[in-house]
Amino acid sequence: KIFTRGPDAFESSGSPMAPRHAELLILLATAARCASLPPFATRSAAARALPRARAARAAVRGAESTAGWDPNGVPPPLDVRTVAPARADTVVGWEAEGVPPPRDGDFVDVFCRGVNAACRASVVGPFRAAAAIRPSATVGGKPGSSLAPAGFWEKALSPPELPPISRPAWLVIAASVPTLLGWYGWYKFSTEEELFWEELRESGRATGCGGYGTLLPFVYAVGIGGAGKLLSVPHAEVLVEIGSVWILAGQVNLYRRVNEIWATGVPTSSEIELEGPGESQAVAGGEPPLHAWWALLPPPLDVIVGLRQLHFLARRNAAGRGEAWAGDAVAETLFPFISAPRFTLRKLARTPSMWFWFTAGMTDFEQDWLKD
């Protein structure tokens, strides 16, 4: 009532103390409202509240002359001009330092930050603390120095970090298979969260929803929809379908972002050579390695682009942390198509040397319909 009506809320109160505290109550109500809003909306809420607070101040001054208020016995009303507006950037810790608010009209950035903040707020505090992104210096390096690559358990159990952790394909497979893809959910969360904050800190703009905003809508939709189907709730399957579309769209967007990162290069590394079957490719200015739309194809083609994303992002992250690439036998030897430079579906079909380690010596097929 105070927030919406301002000093008019006191017209029928009949209390001589009400006008005296009108402005303070306006500001307290504003603070309470801002606490319940998404972080990026707090500045506009505070701005809308200032005219009401000034009107309350005028009402208080009018009450001084009409109610015989003794200004010597009561402190003057708070000057609202000394109240700083709420911060519009969205973060909870060190990672938000220097992150600007979304630009006017940038609805993609506003949407991504809003979804991430809303989903983060839905998680209990202990998990948020355990999954909070941290600077990579906490693993043993120093800011600005090259970090020695961590071992399997350090990488598998680490929360998200900046610069992002290099998690090669062999590690992701080794941790995901025994856990029935449970650990892959942690990988997905960590990777998306790292890219989210890296984008915000480097460009001031987010084009993905982060780990919280990408994973939790899918989990909530599938969990609630699945429970609804078990309880025979009408149309519960729609929630499951919405969750599936959401996670698939997020996967396509992830591939797009990996392509952008690869094409623009890695500032902390001069060049990384990609060894494929008779070909090589460099990170800096290299051709984007992924076809993002392959995520929409049926298995196993969607798995192919997913494995390639693991490899190329791991190579890029290793360079960003100043780590020497230790190699990946799974991606570079056992399944060469994972580490090969960008190729088409026809090239994959006519080049058996890219398929498996035991087909590495086979010659290409020469059928005309397989040529690009």
Image (spheres, rainbow, N blue to C red):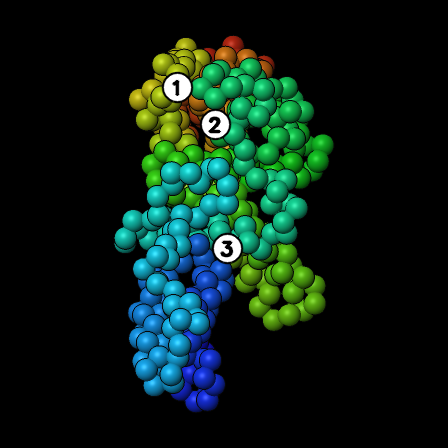
> In terms of secondary structure, where does tag 1 sit?
loop
Q: Which residue ends up furthest to the right in the rendered image?
A: 178
Q: Which residue, given by chain and number where applicable, does mark 1 sit on?
A: 268
Q: Check disc 1 and give the amino acid type.
A: Thr
Tell me the CA gap for discs 3 and 1: 33 Å
Residue bearing mark 2: 163
Q: Are marks 1 and 2 in contact (CB under 8 Å)?
A: yes
Q: Position of residue 238 (x, y in %)?
A: 54, 62
Mark 2 vs mark 3: which is more N-terminal? Answer: 3
Residue receiving disc 3: 118
- Mark 2: which amino acid? Pro
Quadrant (top left, top right, bottom left, bottom right) of the N terminus: bottom left
Identity of the residue drawn at 38% across and 83% down: 68
Secondary structure at badge 2 equals loop
Q: Which residue is painted at 49% across and 30% down in the image? A: 162
Specify whether 203 is left or right of 164: left
Q: Where 205 falls versus 326 (above or below)?
A: below
Where is residue 31? Give x, y as percent: 46, 62
Locate residue 163, reporting x and y percent.
47, 27
Tell me the distance, in whole angstroms, between the alpha carbons under discs 2 and 3. 24 Å
With respect to residue 278, does 291 lie above or below? below
